[in-house]
Every structure is written in structure tokens, then in C-alpha cells.
Amino acid sequence: MTELTIAIAKGRLQAEALALLARAGLRLADEAHLSRRLAIEDESGRYRFIFIKPADVPVYVEHGIADCGLVGRDVLLESEADLLQPLTLEIGRCRIVVAAPDTNLTDGFGMLRVATKYPRIAAKHFGEHGQPVEIIELSGSVELAPVLGLADCIVDLVETGATLRENGLQIVEVIAESSARFVVNRASYQLKARFVSSLLEAVKAGMQEMVVRPPSPIGRETG
Ligand code: PRP
């Protein structure tokens, strides 16, 4: 019988999350990697993985549909979900930044128009600086907004910096550093304590192995 359901953020974190879980001993059959199925058991049958959009991971875990999840800190900062975060993971490192065509952002703008997938993070950041803003919420390709005149700046993730560079944007300010977090539903943490702590220990061991033998870089540009 399945012991735990684990929600995994699809997209940029997914490959690294699966590699970490594999090092922790949770492996998917080869055909499962190629499958479009969104709920898959690992080879041992003890764990069920569900693959969902990053912003939905806190929702599934808070409601107990998933016992645990792997998701970026950026998503958790934007979410209001009440979750336990027992482990910071060494994967999915990125920064949440303010970026614009010109680093001299405040001169002559007054009310800043800010395009973002992170309206709460953006509103909080500019609110703390006493800067009036109009938040323009987008769901992707945010870097286009200042280029096409929809916004003066963006609040978005930067990993390699390639998307900013290639769209003529510069970092004005770093709001926060982000990496993935292992999150746990409050009730599961109590009611399935044995299973959760055994998984946490396995993931910690998997992380140590990654530090000793870091994965070779694939795909994305670095620098
Ligand atoms: C993220 C982010 C940036 C880009 C940054 O978008 O919103 O657009 O990655 O990565 P880089 O610094 O390595 O270039 P994502 O790829 O998740 O897609 P999206 O724009 O559709 O949200």
C-alpha cells in the first residue's frame, strides 16, 4: 500500500527533484519518465508521485491530498498555505529580483507599473519601500512586459540570467534567494510520522550524496 503521496512541481524543478528522490531511493520505472501520467507510483510501491503546477503544490499539500511536496521557496512566499517546511533542498537555486531595462528605476516614474507572476511578493516588496505600484499580473514570459511597454519593471525569477540578458533587462534589486523546500502537511506530519521521518532521512542522505557527487550540468546555461 502507498505510504505517502508526494507532490512534485512540474517544470524547471522537476528533473532535479526526481534526481534527488532517486538518490534518496525513490525511483520511477524508465517508462514512467516518458509517460504523460500525472500520478505515478515509484518502483517500491511505497510512494505515489503527483506532478502538478508549482503554484498548486502548496494547495494539494495543505489540503492533505499530498502528504509532502517539493517546491520552490518563491512559490511558498507567494502562497498563503499553512505548511511545515522541515527541509531546505540544495536544488532549484534562483533569485527573485526586480528587473528593468534601466537600473535607475525610480527616477521620474512616480507610480511604477510592475509586471509579475508573483503579485504578493511584489506588492509586499514595494509596499515596504513606500513605493506606489500598479501590479500587472501575468502568467508567463514576464520579461516581454517592459520590452513592449506594458510595465516599467518586472518581479521575476532569475536562474542563469539568460532570459533577462536576451531581452535587454538588468537586475535592479534582489528581493530574495530561493531554492526548493521539502514541505509536509501538518496532519500527515503527526499521523504518518514514521513514514514522513523515514522519507526525510532518505532525502537528507540523497542530498549529501549530491553534494559529494554533484550532477553534471545539463541543458541550461550557467553564469
Ligand atoms: C522562469 C522565469 C524567467 C526564466 C528565468 O520562467 O520566470 O522567465 O525562467 O530563467 P533564466 O534566468 O535561467 O533565464 P519559466 O522558464 O519558468 O517560464 P515562464 O516564463 O513561462 O513562467
Image (cartoon, helix red, strand yellow):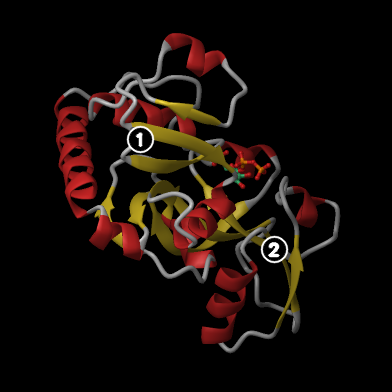
Determine which of the numbered discs, if any, sits on residue 26 in the image.
Answer: none
Q: x and y percent of residue 134 in the render?
A: 76, 77
How many marks overall?
Answer: 2
> Answer yes or no: do the residues labelled 2 and 1 have beta carbons within 8 Å?
no
In percent of width and height, residue 139 lies at 73, 52
Q: Position of residue 179 (x, y in %)?
A: 37, 49
Q: Nearer the viewer, residue 147 or 195?
A: 195
CB of mark 1 near ligand 1 (< 8 Å): no
Per the image, the residue denoted by label 2 is 153
- Identified at 55% across, 48% down, the residue is 54
Instruction: Give percent across and percent down for residue 92.
Output: 41, 41
Decide which of 40, 175 is in the foreground and name it. 40
Query: Disc 2 or disc 1, which is closer to the eye?
Result: 1
> Which residue sits at x=69%, y=63%?
153
Check disc 1 and report its element: helix, strand or loop.
Answer: loop
Does residue 202 sit above or below 149 in this rendering?
above
Task: State the residue position of label 1.
Answer: 2
Q: Residues within 10 Å of mark 2 (few under 14, many from 20)?
A: many
In this rendering, is residue 141 above or below 121? above
Q: Quadrant of the C terminus?
A: top left
Q: Which residue appears at 51% of the width and 57% of the height?
A: 75
For the residue marked with disc 2, what is the amino acid?
Cys
Binning the other alpha carbons within 10 Å of mark 1 as few (below 14), some (14 to 19) or many (20 upward) gives few
Asked if residue 82 lies left or right of residue 55, the reply is: left
Spatial separation of the CA atoms under disc 2 and disc 1: 46 Å
Q: Which SS class for mark 2?
A: strand
Taking the image as shown, residue 205 lies to the left or right of residue 69, namely left
Question: Is residue 189 in view from this perspective?
Answer: yes
Q: Name the side, left or right, on which 63 lies relative to 215.
A: right
| Residue found at x 35% / y 55% | 183
